[in-house]
Image: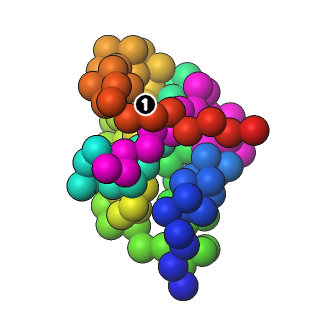
Amino acid sequence: MSLAPDELMNMVVESADDKKAMNIVTLNLQGISLIADYFVICHGNSETQVQAIATEIRKKAEERGVRVRGMEGMETARWVLVDLGDVVVHVFHRDDREYYNIERLWSDAKVVERV
């Protein structure tokens, strides 16, 4: 079973929100990058929370039959990257998110508004 990119993005955002991720931002990269259709960026306030957010996203993706192509950074939990193909998730520790500021690097992308 495969989810459409927007359904996958919504599932990721809901999973991150379930673990109280802070400042969840989704960037629409369609037509801008071949890497993915969406980046979901969020942060946690501790290494434990960062790991919990990333683990929940992986768990929910696997439950929906989505293959997790890669997951990096769980050991240090400062910046965890979860590659779900059409959606790439960046779960930062609060301090590292401010430092890397990848929203600025992808400023050409539109922010997806959620109601």
Q: Nearer the viewer, residue 98 or 74?
A: 98
Residue found at x 38% / y 35%: 109
Q: Quadrant of the N terminus?
A: bottom right
Q: Position of residue 83 (x, y in %)?
A: 35, 57
47 relative to 6, above or below: above
- Tell me: residue 55, above or below residue 18: below
Is residue 70 highlighted in magenta? no
Furthest-right residue in this view: 115
- Identify the amino acid type marked 1: Phe
Q: Bin the neighbour count of mark 1 within 10 Å (Cα to Cα): few under 14, some 14-19, many 20 and up.
A: many
Secondary structure of residue under mark 1: strand
Point out the image quarter for the C terminus.
top right
Display colour scheme: rainbow
Q: Quadrant of residue 84?
A: bottom left
Q: x, y (%) of residue 21?
A: 61, 34
The residue under the point 32% across, 14% down is 99
Residue wearing tag 1: 92
Q: Residue at x 61, y 46 (%)?
A: 13
Q: Is residue 20 magenta?
A: yes
Residue 44 shown left or right of residue 84 in the figure: right
Highlighted range, magenta: 16-31
Q: Position of residue 100 (x, y in %)?
A: 30, 21
Vertically, is 31 above or below 63?
Answer: above
Vertical position of residue 108 compared to residue 64: above or below: above
Q: Is residue 44 visible?
A: yes
The residue sitting at 44% across, 26% down in the picture is 93
